[in-house]
Amino acid sequence: MAYVATRGGEYAIEQAERLFRADLGPITRERVDAVRTGLPYLIDRLMGEASLYEPDLAALALAQAGGDLYEAILLLRAYRTTQPRIAVADPIDQPDLLTVRRISAAFKDIPGGQILGPTLDYSHRLLQVDVLQGNDYVPEPVIPAAKPAPATQPSLTSWQKAQGLIPNHPGETVAPEEIPDLTREPLLFPAARAHKLQSLARADTGGTLALGYASMRGYSAVHPTVNELRLAYAPVRLRHPSGTIFSAGRVRVSQTEVISKAKELQLGFSATFGWNEVKVIAAATLDLASNQPNPHPAANEEFVLYHTEPVESSGFCIHFKLPHYVTFQSTLDALRRVKTDKDTAAAKPAVTEKLAPHQEEVAL
Amino acid sequence: MAALDTTQSAELTRQPPRLMLAEPILTMRGIARIYGNVTALGGVDVTVYPGEVLGIVGESGSGKSTLLRMMNLEDTPDTGIYNLALPGHEGRNLFTLDRFERRMLRAHHIGIVYQNPHLGLLMNHTSSGNVAERLLIAGNRNFAELRERARQSLDASEFPIERMDARPNELSGGMQQRVQLAKAIALEPAILLLDEPTTGLDVSVQALVLDTLKRLQRERSITMVLVSHDLGVIRTMADRVMVMRRGKVVEQGLADQIFQDPQHAYTQQLVHAKL
Amino acid sequence: MKLQELTKPWMAFNYGFLDESAKREIRRRILKAIAVPGYQVPYASREVPIARGWGTGGLQVTLTLLKPTSVVKVIDQGSDDSVNASSIRKFVARVGGAVETEDTMAATIIQSRHRIPEEKLREDQVLVLQVPNPEPLRPVQPDMSVAREMHGDADYGQLWLVLYEQLVKSGRIMQGSSYPSMVNGRHVMTPSPIPRWDVPKLNQADHLTILSAGREKRIFAVPPYTRVEPLVFDDVPYRVEDHQDKTCYRSDVTGFFMNELPQEDGSSQYELSDSHFGVKHIRKLEAEAVEIGETWYKNGRMD
């Protein structure tokens, strides 16, 4: 009987991909622009999780993946792998951030003020179905304040440190090339602080939220208060070989400090590309919870960082669709042998001499 | 750092004549640990003779459990030496052993029973498995033998054999302690350390477990160091007793003498409060 | 003088997709893995255009080893034609321009998910195995950091207990695939989810085996002529799957690892899992000139 050595597998996967793409139609510049202008918060979330800041590329990834966020993250991260490392930007401080939104739940008012910025926090979540009838939803114009909010804000923690409320940890000066880089080194535990914050910066928003929520509900010893939350633009400062420091542009960043009363006030921190408040609040809570002695298993550092990785978690989840029939055959074999052993033992004539229990097991 | 008071008053140390004829199996000299102002252990000497039960009694904060952990090489003092009379280890200060040597020494020569069974047992394995693990570390790879020796050890500890494949968390407190005991004696260790082995158990169960310990000790001449805050337990088990308070030995001697004629004020308090 | 004259012409990506720093890291990790057989070496593990869990670890190793003269075979569950193997093979061709093959004897690099081919591999061949979970201690210790210490201490007692308790409960070892094995007498590794049938092929093999977990970020290796011994009790022999008497309905070959195909009447049919091995036998029956390599198993047995 002839074996038709078909290239069936290769042909099938090609058609399967075509089928997916046929549904989406051509990916055009217009579509990418529409995603870019229309879905900035999704783009922000994507850039954060892909750890690659380039809104056009992010919009393209979303368009190409048809909006499947995990696919889009993989597209961007795989692209990131191909890009050369040109420079390492200079570190910046809190007063360098062009701060658009900045609030604290810890005090009624703080130096610099509670700046609400752009937010839907206090809006009524009413779906504007009129739009589907053809009537555009045009937002009311913003009424400018009499006095503009300051462009930059001092950090609340500097006040708290001056008050002696929180310890003032001395800053470390690290040469840019020496900064640990999670994308170039394996993550080992206990994790380096830089690795931990990088991991949380590009963590899956949903996974971080799930574990953060568990901590907040009591599956850990922390009771977080938002010390300070910011949405800002961070300058990207590079050094020219001649020594001049110049700006390569700005990136949107969000960050949160949470504070908790354990034996003394302790801080948890998280920052990420783009504006993603849910993630940074949850991540900062997990930072704090995982730093406690004997954390709850769901807030254990290794557990949190491993399971909030979007590319690893989604990839492994869907890998269960791959054929597993060889390992399954191995398992079946073991189970069948046990059954055969039992049948054989039952079929044997009754043994007059009673074997000691351990001898019976070896005889099988 | 304040000078350590390592003197132990001669009158308070009464030697047991008959046991003194043998060479000690365990010696600790000058065991000290200080945290800032706190003297956890202030220069303690311990001697244990083969086949005897040394009871160490004291209240919490006396340092007795810390001392036992050091005997198990789980902990190291700031200063002090520790010898066990074992072939290949004569004269060696065991606190200088590296991580692997400690593990091997603990596995082969020291048995320990903890107050908390979670410290001494692998909860996600069976009871016979727990005992077998000791034998596996010692290199035994024969399934039939592992099973049989585990059974024997559990049997000697008066553990019901029909439950030998139950997991420890399916068992009562007393049975968990028996599994710990079976595990501890599986390789016939040079010394058996017991840290409050019956504390927390029901009084009736305590008595049964102590009976087993006493019987085993007699049958096999197992050298034991038993730490307890409970004088009743010490009285039942110990040949010699060491009384500790705030990191120091205040009195030691034969059990009978300590209980009938305590010399130190603190010992008197303890003994009389109990009676 | 223009900058463009000084640089290379623009390319979408480097030869073999990974940039040189990524390849350098992987080469160094592979060397370390060979120097300490069975020890899991952590590595950064770059993202590649294939989802994690789908062979990115094996792929990174293959791409690092790749040269234009490489001859690459890719299989999944023993089959070159499976969708995942096809996808990986296509990618390697796309980024490396190496030669593709289905013939085990012709390949210089064989990337495989969950099987070792039946024809013996030679000293000049490298086997790259895809590994989902590199940690054999995972069933007794989910934390990688604690497991790492246990390997350092050679603390494998609990792993033996898992096997002991299988024997107590079921009367035989129930470990299906991924049978924990002692490498070079020091480190226990998982041979990846290959069946028990395949594990003995690694012992004192002529070829180099590299095992790579992309998602979990570990590389380990079995150098040639190295002991690989499945953990077995002295009195309970190692047992492979019961395939020595099974016959492939397509090629009529007996005594190799088979795929079981349920039939409508309730029975089972068997076909060779190593699909190209089967193809070679069919071509031979049809009087084609085809070279079939020496196999590890003979008459359904491996001594």
Image (cartoon, coloured by chain):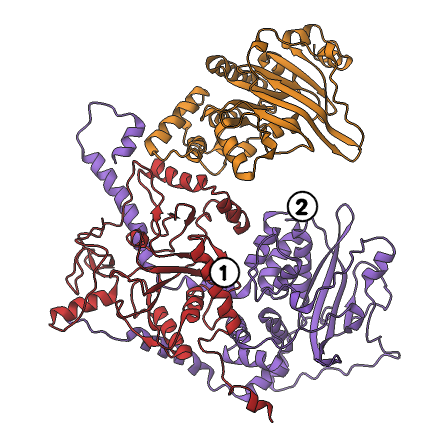
Chain colours: A purple, B orange, C red
Q: Which one is nearer the viewer's eye here, A25 or B261?
A: B261
Percent of width and height locating residue B146 = 37, 31
Q: Is residue A133 above or below residue B30?
A: below
**Circle 2 or circle 1, nearest the eye:** 1
Residue B245 is left or right of residue B122, and the answer is right
Query: Is residue B160 in view?
Result: no
Q: Quadrant of residue A224?
A: bottom right
Subunit of mark 1?
Answer: C
Q: Is residue B92 left or right of residue C211?
A: right
Decide: few, some or many residues near mark 1? Use Cα within 10 Å; few <14, some 14-19, many ≥20.
many
Quadrant including the C terminus of chain B: top right
- Please name whichever residue, C81 or B142, is drawn nearer the observer in this view of the structure: B142
Give left or right: position of B160 versus C119: right
Residue for point 75% across, 80% down: A244
Q: Answer whether labels 2 and 1 touch (C-beta < 8 Å).
A: no
Tell me the crowding category of disc 2: few under 14, some 14 to 19, or many 20 or more residues within 10 angstroms, Cα based: few
* Residue at the extreme front: B91
Q: Dot 2 corresponds to which residue?
A: A293
Circle 2: residue type = Pro
Disc 1: which residue: C217
Residue at the spot 75% in from the left edge and 47% down from the top edge? A262
Q: In the rendered structure, the residue with mark 2 lies on which chain?
A: A
Measured from the top left, where is residue C191 in percent x and y?
A: 37, 54
Q: Is residue A334 above or below residue A87?
A: above
